[in-house]
Amino acid sequence: MPKTIIVSNRLPVKIQENNGEYTLLPSEGGLATGLGSIYKQSDNIWIGWPGLEITDETVQKKITKQLKEQSLLPVFLSQEEITEYYEGFSNEVLWPVFHYYASTYANYKESNWEFYQQVNDKFKQRILDIAKPGDTIWVHDYQLMLLPSLLRKENPDLSIGFFLHIPFPSYEMFRLIPWRAELMNGILGADLVGFHTFDDVRHFINASTRILPIQSSANIITDGERSIVVESFPMGIDDKKYAELTRDPEVKKDIKLIHDSFKNTKLIVTIDRLDYSKGILQRLQVFEYVLEHYPDYREKIALYMVVVPSRDTVPQYAHLRDQIDKRVGTINSVYRTMDWVPIHYYYRSMPLEMLSALYSTADVCLVTPMRDGMNLVSKEYVASRVNNDGVLVLSEMAGASKELIDALIVNPNNTVEVAQTLIQAINMPVEEQRRRMVQMRQMVSKFNVSHWVKIFMDKLNEVKQLQRSMLTRYIGSATEQSIINRYAKTQKRIIFLDYDGTLVDFKPVIDQAVPDEDLYTIIDQLTEDPANHVVLISGRKHDILGEWFADCSIDLIAEHGAWFKKQHSIWHKLPGLSAQWKHDIMQVMETYVDRTPGTFIEEKSYSLVWHYRKAQKGLGELRAGELMNTLKYIANDKGLQLLPGNKVVEVKNMEINKGKAALTMVDGDKYDFIMALGDDYTDEDIFKALPDNAVTIKIGSNVSAAKFYLRTPSEARRLLKTLAENSFVKH
Ligand code: GDG
C-alpha cells in the first residue's frame, strides 16, 4: 500500500541524554500535533534531523531503533553540516531574505550553499531508501527547498507536496539570492506548493515565471509537461487542546499565581522565539512610548514578555538577545517604582501549562512581528480565551492577520499607532471584546490544524489525479496504434492543422517561423494519398500563408476563418464581414504601443493584434489585462471578439471562428476520419465544433477540450509522418 512520508529539518521530538541513555520527549509543536494523524498511521513515517549531533555509529543505531517505534526516521548531521547548512545557509541567507532583512543580515557564503545542497541530498538518500513509486512525500519548509526536485529526478512517479512555513518574499527580494534559479527549480519538483497566504502565492508565481522559462495560468505553473499547483493553506492550531488546557489543575494553579502577582494591573503578554523578524525591540519601544506619553497608565499596566531562546549560536541572534536585555533593563530602571515593575522579561522556554495560564490571564496579547509567515501565538491566544474576552493586537505583517480580521490590526513600524492601539485595547469595553473574540474563535476552530492537513492532502491527491488524467490522454504507443488503425481503415479523411505552436515552434519574431523542408515533405507525403484532404487553419494573414504553401495540395483557412482558399485556387473572403471598426480599435491599441516599449500592432484584414512578447516581463501581461478591460465595452457594441492569446491580444469579428470554419468544411461531405491538431485557445473552437468521433489533439499541456495531447510540434510532426507512412496499407 502506498505510504506517506513527512519530511522536515527537525523531527517532532526532543532527545535528552542521561549517562548514555536517550529519552525521547514528544514535541509540543503544532506541526507535530497536526501531522500526528498522518505519520503514526500504518507504514507512514516522518524523516528529519533528531536535533543533536551523534557521531558514534552504535549510538546512531540505538536511537534509530528507538525512533522507529514512534514512526520516525533520523537523518544524522555532523556539526559542520549543522553550522553550514542550518545556521549558515538556512538562517543567514534564506531566513533574512524571506523576511525582508536581506540588506541587514544576509550573508551569501559559497560554502554554506555547498552544504545546503549536500544536506538536501542526504535527506533525498534517506527518503529514497524507503520510498516506493506511488508514495506521497510532504516536504516542509525553507531548509529543504531543493528536495522536491532531487526526489523527482530519481523517482518521477512520487507525489510530492511542499509547504513553506515562512513568507515567500516579492521577486525583488528573492532575486538577490545568488542561487535563486536553483532554489526555484528545487521547489518546482513538487506537484503542489503551499504557502500560508495568498500574497505568498502571488510572489512565488511571479518570481518563478521571471526567473525560469516557465508559464503560469492562474495558480498553475507549467514546467515542460508537468503542471504544478500553487495554493494558500493557512495553517491552524489544535484549538481544542488550548481550550482544554485552561481547565487543567496545573494551569489553574499558574493562573492563580499570575492573578495574585498582577492584582490591579492590566496584563499585556507577548510570546516569541528570539528573532529579529518578531519585532521585539520595536515592541519595547512602543511600551516605553506609552509609559512616557501616557503617564496615567504607569503602575496600571505590565508587560509580560517571554522570549524563547533560539538560534543564539548565530551571531546576529546573540546580539539581538543582548540588545533586548539592555533595553528592558533601561526601561525598568527608569520607570520602576517601589511596588511596580513595568516589564517582566523571561528569556527561557516555558512549560506549556504556564503558556496556557499566560494566554488565559492576559488582558491583551501583543503580537507585532515585522514579518511572520503565519504566527501561531496569536491563534493560541484566541483558542485559550474560553470566556470570549481579551484583546488581540496583531501586526498586519503576520499571515494570521489575513484571517483574524477582528483583531486590532497595526503596522508594527508605526510606534505611535501601535501605542495608541495598545491604549485602545486596554480600555476596550467587554461587549466589544466579546464581539471580536467570538468571530476569531470561530475562525480558529474551523480552520484548525487537522483541517489544514486535510485540505493540503486532498489537494495533493487531486493534483496527482489531474496529472494522471492528462497523462492517459497523452498519445503513447498504444493510443498511437489505435489512431493508425482507424486511419488505415478509412477512405475519406479530413485533417485540420493549425500552424504556429502546432507544426512549428514559437519564434521571438513572428516572421521567423517559416515552414522548413521537413514540414513540406510531411505535407507532401500526407497529400499524396487521395483519401486525405488536408486543411491548414491558422490565425495568420492570408497572403503569407498563400505564399508559403503555394505549391502544396492543401486547402488554407487564414485569419481564423476570414479567408479560405481551395487548393490551387484563389482566396475568398467570408461574405458580409466589415472592417469599419478597425480605425477606433487601432487608436486605442496605439496608445498601448506608445506606453509599452517592445509592443506592436499587426493588422490583418478583419482583425487587429497587439503583440507584447518582447515587452518587459510582467508589464506586457499587466497592459494586456488593461487593454482587454478598455476594449470590453466597445468590442461588445461593435460585435467584436477579444482573444487573449500567447503574448497577444487579438480583436476580430465575432462571426469569424476557426470552429465554424472547420465545420463548414466537414458539413455535407461524408468523412470517415476527422482529425484536428492545435495548440492554442482559438483551436479549442475547432475541438468543440467537430463531431464526437473526431480525433482532436492538443499540442502542449494546458487544459483543453481535445481528446488527446502531444507535447511539442516535433511530436505532432512525428505522428503525421507515421500516419502518412500508413496511408496505403489498405489500398
Ligand atoms: C514558523 C514561522 C509560522 C513559544 N514559546 C514557547 C512555546 N512556543 C510555541 C508557541 C507556538 C510556537 O512556539 C511558535 O510559533 P510561531 O508561529 O509563533 O512562530 P515560529 O516559531 O517562527 O514558526 C511562523 C510557523 O512556523 C508555523 O508555520 O506560523 O510564521 O515563522 O506554537 O506556542 N511553547 C512552549 N513554551 C514556550 O515558552 N511550550
Image (tube, rainbow, N blue to C red):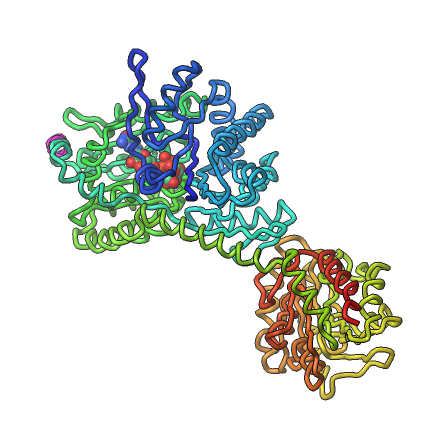
Residue shown at 77% from the left, 73% from the top? 534
Q: Residue extending furthest right?
A: 551
In this rendering, would 182 be left or right of 497?
Answer: left
Q: Residue extending furthest top?
A: 19
Q: Is residue 698 visible?
A: yes
Residue 518 shown in magenta: no
Q: What stretch is highlighted in magenta?
A: 255-262
Quarter in which the N terminus is drawn: top left
Between 513 and 676, the residue placed more toward the observer is: 676
402 above or below 369? below
In this rendering, would 71 be left or right of 351?
Answer: right
Picture quadrant where residue 600 is located: bottom right
Q: Where is residue 354 in the image (x, y as percent from the top left)?
A: 20, 31
Q: Residue extending furthest bottom?
A: 576
Q: Where is residue 717 in the image (x, y as percent from the top left)?
A: 75, 60
Q: Residue extending furthest front?
A: 730
In this rendering, would 295 be left or right of 235?
Answer: left
For ligand 1, the image quadrant comes to top left
Residue 256 shown in magenta: yes
Picture quadrant where residue 251 is located: top left
Between 328 and 307, the residue placed more toward the observer is: 307
